[in-house]
């Protein structure tokens, strides 16, 4: 033994340090042993993919990225599989996130911001021409190469045109709240191209202002601002830049500016250089399907479990009288038969935590999908206290939980809820204001 560390190899790639980690994947630096070229190796754990029912989304991400060959989009080179892992070989981008550039240096000049925005629009336009909608465009998903050119990454929430329903619209609520278009939140179906352009408008605003146009520690207040396009351009922006931002951040997708119109815009056209690259022939994604099929991952969708009932932001707001959101999730809600709270935890975790908390309090628990029936085995003043709970999905990582007294004494229900909420402290979501109050 010479004490030298043995290199791990995946196919022809020598694997090095970890450069990123997520819930379902790990990204490592790797090098092509034949050419010496650096790459990013994304490693997916087959067991986790199956456990969390993520096969369809991950397969979509891989298939989407294989379809896209553009200088401003992170390139996917190759897909491989082993007994327990799926390996995705990606272009290694060294310049960091555009988000960090703004965080460290503040807002950009209009000249610099325009160059990045031109590259973003070129890439998004190309993706749309191939029937691909990103659906999660944000500063964190925009990387920079060593020449300072923009690269769009992370197609995990993208939608291929085949997923559009008969009405010609997409119907999955997804994306990061601050960047999401009003029609996506409204859950009435939306045009993927128009929704992506809204996100581009948010990005342009952030590049030139140094902060986001829509921001609030309370998610529901944030949704209200987005739906009304309630934002103010900073005074240092030129008139033509403000004009373009206002046309993009139009809450009506039918009148929102389109890509061809942006390409003709006075502010956008300044110093514009269209990208020069070779169109590739039709991409074969047989290797993607083979990797997933070998592990019967594609069959997972047949076993897919029930999901929480979806609830869009506007239905949620309508639960509150006169749109007074302050009282909607207040734990101290008087002698009410129903109490609600929000959580950023996965729905399954919320269900399990409620069950763990209710059983020691003397309750029999019955579960079906994302609804629960809790019955106190000991009779109270008005018989046995019966409590029903249901989880609603407002956004992919944001749930509302309804706790409702079905039978029994209201005071006993409130006492029970107070004990329950103490046990659920790590589940109930708190706003920044709540955190400040506890200091």
Image (cartoon, rainbow, N blue to C red):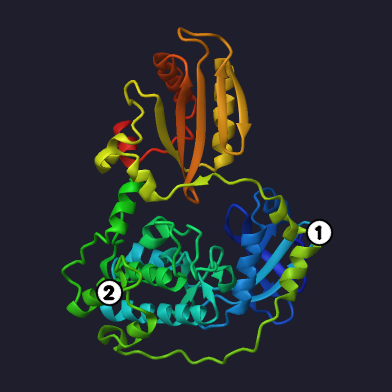
Q: Residue at x 67, y 73 (%)?
A: 31
- The residue sitting at the front extreme is 166
Q: Decide if residue 28 is in sight here.
A: yes
| Residue count near mark 1 (Cα–Cα under 10 Å), binned few <14, some 14–19, many ≥20 | few
Is the C terminus in the top left, top right, bottom left or bottom right quadrant? top left
Disc sitting over residue 247 in the figure: 2
Splitting the image into 4 quarters, where does residue 323 fall? top left
Circle 1 — which element? loop
Closest to the camera, between mark 2 and mark 1, is 2
The residue labelled by disc 1 is 83
Splitting the image into 4 quarters, where does residue 80 fall? bottom right
Q: Residue at x 49, y 73 (%)?
A: 152
Q: Position of residue 218 (x, y in %)?
A: 33, 45
Nearest the camera: 172 or 232?
172
Q: Which residue is drawn at 36% across and 24% down?
A: 336
| Residue count near mark 2 (Cα–Cα under 10 Å), binned few <14, some 14–19, many ≥20 | some
Distance from disc 2 to disc 1, alpha carbons, whole Å, reads 51 Å
Horizontal side, residue 34 vs residue 58: left or right: right
Q: Which residue is drawn at 54% across and 44% down?
A: 308
């Amino acid at each position: 033994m010479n004490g030298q560390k043995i290199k791990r190899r995946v196919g022809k790639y020598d694997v090095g340090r970890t450069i990123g980690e997520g819930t379902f994947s790990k990204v490592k630096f790797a090098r092509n042993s034949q050419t010496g070229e650096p790459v990013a190796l994304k490693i997916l754990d087959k067991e986790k993919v199956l456990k969390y029912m993520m096969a369809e989304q991950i397969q979509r991400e891989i298939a989407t990225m294989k379809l896209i060959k553009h200088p401003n989009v992170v390139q996917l080179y190759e897909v491989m599989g082993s007994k327990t892992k799926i390996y995705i070989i990606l272009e290694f981008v060294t310049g960091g996130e555009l988000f960090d550039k703004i965080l460290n240096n503040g807002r950009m000049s209009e000249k610099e911001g325009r160059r990045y925005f031109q590259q973003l629009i070129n890439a998004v336009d190309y993706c749309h021409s191939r029937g691909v909608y990103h659906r999660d465009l944000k500063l964190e998903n925009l990387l920079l190469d060593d020449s300072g050119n923009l690269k769009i990454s992370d197609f995990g929430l993208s939608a291929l045109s085949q997923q559009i329903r008969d009405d010609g619209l997409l119907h999955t609520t997804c994306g990061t709240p601050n960047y999401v278009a009003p029609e996506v939140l409204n859950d009435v179906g939306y045009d993927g191209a128009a929704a992506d352009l809204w996100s581009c408008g948010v990005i342009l605003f952030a590049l030139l202002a140094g902060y986001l146009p829509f921001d609030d520690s309370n998610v529901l207040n944030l949704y209200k601002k987005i739906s009304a396009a309630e934002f103010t351009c900073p005074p240092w922006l030129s008139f033509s830049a403000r004009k373009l931002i206002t046309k993009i951040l139009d809450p009506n997708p039918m009148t929102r500016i389109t890509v061809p119109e942006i390409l003709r815009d006075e502010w956008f056209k300044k110093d514009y250089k269209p990208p020069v690259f070779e169109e590739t022939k039709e991409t074969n994604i047989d290797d993607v399907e083979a990797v997933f099929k070998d592990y019967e991952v594609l069959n997972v969708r047949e076993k897919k479990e029930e999901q929480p009932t979806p609830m869009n932001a506007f239905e949620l707001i309508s639960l509150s009288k006169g749109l007074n959101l302050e009282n909607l999730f207040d734990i101290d809600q008087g002698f009410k038969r129903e109490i609600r709270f929000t959580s950023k935890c996965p729905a399954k975790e919320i269900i399990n935590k409620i069950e763990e908390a209710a059983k020691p309090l003397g309750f029999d628990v019955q579960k079906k999908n994302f609804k629960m029936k809790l019955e106190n085995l000991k009779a109270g003043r008005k018989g046995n206290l019966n409590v029903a709970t249901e989880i609603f999905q407002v956004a992919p990582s944001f749930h509302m939980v309804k706790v409702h007294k079905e039978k029994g004494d209201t005071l006993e229900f409130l006492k029970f809820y107070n004990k329950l909420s103490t046990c659920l402290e790590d589940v109930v979501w708190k706003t920044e204001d709540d955190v400040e109050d506890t200091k």
